[in-house]
Amino acid sequence: MPHSTRLPRTGLLRTVAALALAAGTLLAAGPAPAQDGPTGSQTGGAAVAIAAETVSRDGTTRLTLTLSRAIEARAFVMERPDRAVIDLPEVNFQLDQETGKMSGRKRDGAIASFRYGLFAPGRSRIVVDLTGPAVVEAIETTTTREGAVLVSIPFRKVDRDTFRKAAVAGDPSPAAKAAPKAPPKAASMNEAADTRPLIVIDAGHGGTDPGAIAATGVFEKDIVFGFAQSFAERLEQSGRYRLLMTRDRDVFVPLAERVRIAREAKADLFVSIHADSISAAPQVKGATIYTGSEKATDSESARLAERENRADAAAGTESGEGPADVADILQELTLRETRGFSAGFAGRLMGQLSPVMEMSTKPHREAGFKVLRSPDVPSVLIELGYLSSKSDLEKLQSEEWRARVTGSMAKAVDLFFSGRSTLSRPALVAPKRSAAIAPVSP
């Protein structure tokens, strides 16, 4: 799934008067609603961004934001790939329909594309893909007579050595680069005594990582979040399970954090929801179920896993440390048992989904997805369909189709947990020797 959210480039800034008028209209109407969370909550005091434009002149490319009030912005650059990261307090991005599609492919000077969104609670981020080495010069803030605030971020092209030095000098601390972890929720006595299976539902992408983008401008992150919510609600109705979602709104969650959430909660099942896109092959359609493996089933699966595993870089952060490598034969057996459970659930999913939705030519495949690396939580990743397929996109946006599919998925979950043997969560056995366990390479 392509992670670069690409914004259209007009090549010219709108006139200051037009921008100010838009800002004045918005301010007069009161604060705009923030990006919706699961209950449509609002951020109230967040600054509102109502326009984003780029212009290149005299060797400098400027990205200018129009905001409802002044904010503090911090920028740094990163290599592999070349990109700039603009960290902001929480911003409510209310851009016009054309800009909001974030699907343009025009380059403008030093900027190839950029994406934006909620990076963590209280923090927003803009990630700028650069056409080559470039540094961010002093960020300028001006206020129009009408009260709109213009934040101008200038990019100047430099040689590779200068860029590399800037990347090292501006490198934030590891804590600043990664999204902060949510504090663990203290379990009540009733929750601690609840022996129902715990299912973690992972809505792919989010925040600064939109995932695939349909030709209509629809984001994968929105499609899969809505589906994940419906699936959770369907399971909750039965009263048989405890549910936990890795993200409860449009926010970025690192890949390793998704795995950590499931493992620390001692989940009995992890289900990650996605929707792929292949713009070069719009005829390709249908759902695919993936389970984890070091060796991919085929080259297509390997490429998809590689794209998915770059999600952290797309959000302007480094990959977090994943689960430890297997360093003991007993742990190897635990991993095999877990993958056996994962394959068993994948088989039940195929059996239930095939009658209600179109499946791909190879409905069950394996690949090295980072979110499927938990050694002790059965895990699957479901690609619901292709946003590049017109028929798949129509189905993905249909409430009737969603109801049928989530109902069938719930039946697969019931079958998976119908035998008492499957309720025993694989226990990760500690290695007998005291040697340190090496971390998995990002």
Image (cartoon, grey):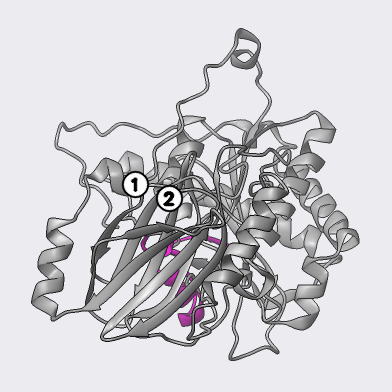
**Taking 285 as reference, is 4 left or right?**
left
Q: Which residue is mark 1?
A: 178
User: Between residues 351 and 147, which one lies in front from this camera angle?
Assistant: 147
Q: Is residue 126 magenta?
A: no
**Which quadrant would residue 397 be assigned to in this image?**
bottom right
Above or below, 290 relative to 88? below
Residue 173 in the image: state x and y as whole percent.
21, 45
Q: Amino acid at mark 1?
A: Ala
Q: Is residue 305 magenta?
A: yes
User: Between residues 157 and 117, which one lies in front from this camera angle?
Assistant: 157
Determine the residue positioned at 70% across, 41% down: 38
Q: Is residue 212 visible?
A: no
For marks 2 and 1, give the one nearer the viewer. 1
**How busy is the neighbourhood of tag 2: few (under 14 within 10 Å), some, or many (20 plus)?**
many
Furthest-front residue in this view = 145
Above or below, 230 relative to 11? above
Cα–Cα gap, marks 2 and 1: 8 Å
Q: Which residue is mark 2?
A: 254
Query: What range of the chain is rendered magenta?
Result: 290-314
Q: Amino acid at mark 2?
A: Pro
Determine the residue positioned at 31% across, 70% down: 154
**Taking 149 as reference, is 140 left or right?**
left
Q: Is residue 302 visible?
A: yes
Above or below, 6 relative to 419? below
Residue 14 in the image: state x and y as whole percent.
54, 77
Q: Secondary structure at mark 2?
A: loop
**Taking 392 as reference, is 101 left or right?**
left
Residue 54 in the image: state x and y as whole percent.
44, 77
Residue 403 in the image: state x and y as whole percent.
87, 54
User: Between residues 342 and 76, which one lies in front from this camera angle?
Assistant: 76
